[in-house]
Amino acid sequence: MPTGYTEAVQSGAITTLPAFALRCARAFGAAITMRDDPMDAPLPEAFTPRTGYNDERLPQAQAALARLLTMTPEQAEVAAFDAHQAEAASYQKYVAEKRAHRKRYTAMLAQVEAWQPDPEVASLRDFMLEQLRTSLDFDCGYEAPAPVRMGAEAWREKAIAEAERDVKYHTKAIADEVERTAGRNRWLAALRASLPAT
């Protein structure tokens, strides 16, 4: 039985080494971005770095950092209060969801514990109990502490550190993707150069 790579050889659609090599090249890291493309999609002459997400986020992080660095103490006080309000609302939603999850799990757990199945399928009941208990422990076994309101300066320092981290992260992610793409393009060029002309 042919694989996705050899079916075109089996059918006669591919008869040359270069065509087969370029088809198989998508199994290597250089063509990883083509993994979801149709098998007959040709390999490009060169890949383009995919930095869209980081290109979009980097200026946002830089703007946030600039805003934080020029923030007055009064603005920091308002921003710290607003941030705490948002965190408190998010925490209340989180707590309500945890309680709802716990209620649903324990209700189903009670039903499964009360179920007396035929001995032939008793292992199913045991599996169901194990799954529910594991999920209950994982999803509801820990509740994060409520957010604590920070002073304006402490909040600002933390926000600046986070913004600096974001700027650094997105800058590095862009550079890394450009470097990876250059390496993939070198590999692709070496492959094409090593194949006989058709």
Image (cartoon, helix red, strand yellow):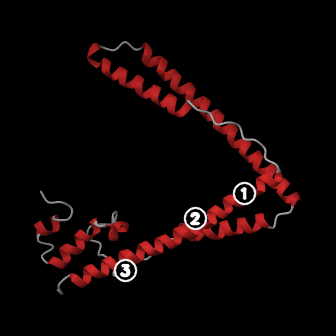
Q: Which mark is residue 46?
A: 3
Quarter that holds the N terminus = bottom left
Viewer can see residue 44: no
Circle nearer the N terminus (3, 1): 3
Amino acid type indicated by mark 2: Tyr
Amino acid type indicated by mark 1: Ala
Circle nearer the N terminus (2, 3): 3
Amino acid type indicated by mark 3: Ala
Can you give x and y, in whole percent of width and height, for residue 95 in the image? Answer: 65, 34
Circle nearer the N terminus (1, 2): 1
Q: Which mark is residue 186?
A: none
Q: Is residue 10 left or right of residue 162?
A: left
- Residue at disc 1, secondary structure: helix
The answer to whether marks 2 and 3 mark residues whose Cβ atoms lie closer than 8 Å is no
The answer to whether marks 3 and 1 mark residues whose Cβ atoms lie closer than 8 Å is no
Q: Dot 2: within a 10 Å radius of its alpha carbon, few (fewer than 14), some, or many (20 or more) residues?
A: some
- Please identify, in this view, whether the residue under mark 2 or under mark 3 is nearer the observer: 2
Q: Is residue 168 placed above or below 124 in the rendered structure?
A: below
> Closest to the observer: 54 or 153?
153
Can you give x and y, in whole percent of width and height, for residue 72 in the image? Answer: 86, 63
Quadrant of the image occupied by residue 195: bottom left
Label 1, on which residue? 159
Label 2, on which residue? 169
> Closest to the observer: 112 or 60?
60
Viewer can see residue 38: yes
Q: Whole-Å distance between the Cαs marked 3 and 1?
A: 40 Å
